[in-house]
């Protein structure tokens, strides 16, 4: 979703006034300006030009003559029909939406204009054959029938290396989908701004495919999902400790000059080889996925991304691993090594003051552990105030099949529009999970 509200333009005839008034009543519509004495009936709709209302489904703009875009009979000329939910709706042409938002002058609309202009160019681009889509289809189709549907994760031997594929839950599949859904507008917007080089970085890339716990089928990992994004990035950098996984990824991707693989610790590779190449003055901009398996990511990497002013970040904040290893209810029993790893991820030992509050008992004081949400909010504050990201999303809890939070996802950017997009992606998937 690119814009954060829905506007409708209604035809000016008595039958339509009555139908719209009925629909607004069913949605429990209330005027946003708090004018409770004005009834949203057919007569009001007939004599007014526009109303902003709050409904039980969200904010809705009801306009009979949107500024800059004309009345219903003019808009309908360029509109097209789309299926949304269970039925078709008529959607205004993109050019008309751009004119409407430019004419409104609202700050939120002016921010969205940049995205809509890039989307216009992307539509033209998408009319050409999708190289990324064909690539992903070919890669998934190479899996043999013997590999599919197995109860345990299969292995593949490539030369002297054996690759074991991870079995992933629905929350991991959703995460990969979210990454691709942010990568697409990120690439689209920068492509519309001539002269920029778009760089995608995956610090824990894996072999490019996983096994779905739900279906037993192979599913694309984040590298393949982003390689399928259109328009494509100019460069891709994939990092993993396991050479066997990188060999499998190279086999899937093929000998592409725009794809570079690195075997090693991402904390070292990112700081010494990848991030230094994404310089502001060179018009290079990056999107970096930091998806650690646990507390094996260092704060310096996140801080370097934030202070670069050139890198957007999607971060897996591994709260379950923190709870298993460092954030015990009795902090005195946590090992020195676990505390050291927690400090390396957090950046300093302030995590211990965030994670625990002092309570007074009958005879003595004792530490009480804070909840996951409090810890995630504190880390969000660090990403802004210490790492240097201008905008950081609210954390999205990623829950397993039992409803327990496994980790949180953060999106961070130097641009408001970046976090506006990631927040809308998060919101969509958070609502989708609640609906199930």
Image (cartoon, helix red, strand yellow):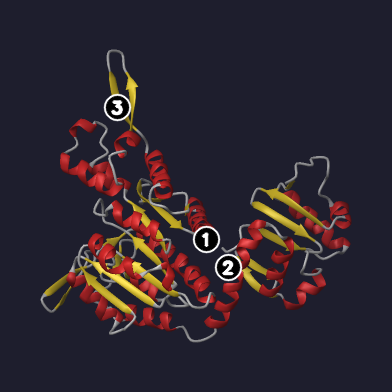
Asked if the residue at tag 1 contacts the one at tag 2, i.e. Cβ–Cβ closer than 8 Å, the answer is yes
Question: For the residue labelled by badge 3, is the local secondary structure a helix, a strand or a loop?
Answer: strand
Residue closer to the observer: 393 or 107: 107
Residue at 49% across / 50% down in the picture?
A: 434
State the CA–CA distance, disc 2 to disc 3: 48 Å
Residue closer to the observer: 152 or 348: 348
Question: For the residue labelled by badge 1, is the local secondary structure a helix, a strand or a loop?
Answer: helix
Label 1 CA crowd tier, 10 Å (few <14, some 14–19, many 20+): many
Residue 152 screen position, x and y as percent: 21, 64
Q: Earlier in the sequence, mark 1 or mark 3?
A: 3
**Residue under pointer 2:** 115
Label 2 CA crowd tier, 10 Å (few <14, some 14–19, many 20+): many
**Residue under pointer 3:** 367
Residue at 43% across / 49% down in the picture?
A: 384
Q: Earlier in the sequence, mark 2 or mark 1?
A: 2
State which quadrant residue 273 falls in: bottom left
Residue closer to the observer: 344 or 32: 344
Residue 179 screen position, x and y as percent: 41, 64
Instruction: Name, please, the residue furthest toward the bottom.
Output: 129
Residue at 39% across / 61% down in the picture?
A: 308
Q: Is residue 61 left or right of residue 158?
A: right
In the image, is residue 356 above or below residue 433?
above
Q: Confirm whether residue 419 shows in the render.
A: yes
Marking on residue 421? 1
Instruction: Name, please, the residue furthest toward the top.
Output: 363
């Amino acid at each position: 979703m690119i814009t954060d509200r829905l506007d409708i333009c209604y035809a000016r005839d008595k039958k339509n006034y009555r139908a719209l008034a009925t629909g607004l009543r069913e949605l429990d519509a209330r005027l946003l300006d708090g004018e409770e004495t004005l009834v949203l009936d057919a007569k009001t709709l007939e004599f007014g030009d526009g109303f902003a209302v709050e409904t039980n489904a969200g904010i809705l703009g009801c306009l009979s003559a949107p500024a800059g875009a004309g009345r219903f009979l003019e808009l309908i000329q360029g509109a097209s029909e789309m299926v949304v939910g269970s039925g078709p709706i008529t959607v205004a042409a993109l050019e008309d939406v751009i004119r409407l938002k430019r004419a409104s002058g609202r700050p939120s609309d002016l921010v969205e204009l940049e995205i809509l202009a890039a989307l216009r160019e992307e539509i033209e681009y998408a009319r050409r054959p999708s190289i990324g889509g064909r690539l992903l289809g070919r890669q998934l189709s190479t899996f043999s029938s013997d590999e599919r549907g197995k109860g345990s994760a299969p292995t593949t031997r490539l030369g002297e290396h054996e690759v074991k594929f991870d079995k992933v839950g629905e929350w991991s599949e959703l995460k990969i989908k979210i990454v691709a859904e942010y990568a697409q507008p990120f690439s689209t917007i920068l492509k519309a701004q001539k002269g920029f080089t778009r760089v995608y970085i995956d610090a824990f890339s894996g072999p490019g495919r996983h096994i779905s716990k739900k279906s037993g089928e192979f599913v694309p990992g984040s590298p393949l999902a982003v390689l399928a994004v259109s328009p494509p990035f100019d460069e891709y950098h994939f990092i993993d400790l396991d050479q066997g996984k990188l060999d499998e990824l190279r086999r899937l991707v093929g000998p592409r000059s725009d794809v570079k693989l690195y075997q090693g610790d991402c904390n070292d590779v990112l700081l010494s080889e990848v991030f230094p190449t994404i310089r502001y003055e060179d018009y290079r901009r990056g999107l970096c996925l930091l998806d650690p398996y646990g507390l094996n990511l260092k704060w310096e990497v996140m801080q370097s991304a934030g202070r670069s002013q050139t890198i957007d970040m999607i971060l897996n904040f591994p709260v379950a691993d923190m709870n298993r290893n460092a954030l015990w209810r009795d902090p005195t029993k946590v090992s020195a090594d676990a505390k050291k790893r927690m400090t390396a991820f957090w950046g300093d030992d302030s995590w211990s003051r965030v994670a625990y509050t002092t309570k007074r008992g009958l005879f003595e004081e004792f530490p009480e552990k804070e909840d996951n949400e409090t810890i995630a909010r504190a880390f969000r504050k660090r990403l802004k105030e210490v790492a240097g990201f201008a905008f950081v999303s609210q954390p999205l809890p990623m829950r397993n099949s039992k409803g327990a939070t496994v980790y949180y996802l953060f999106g961070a950017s130097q641009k408001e529009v970046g976090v506006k997009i990631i927040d809308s992606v998060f919101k969509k998937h958070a609502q989708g999970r609640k609906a199930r």
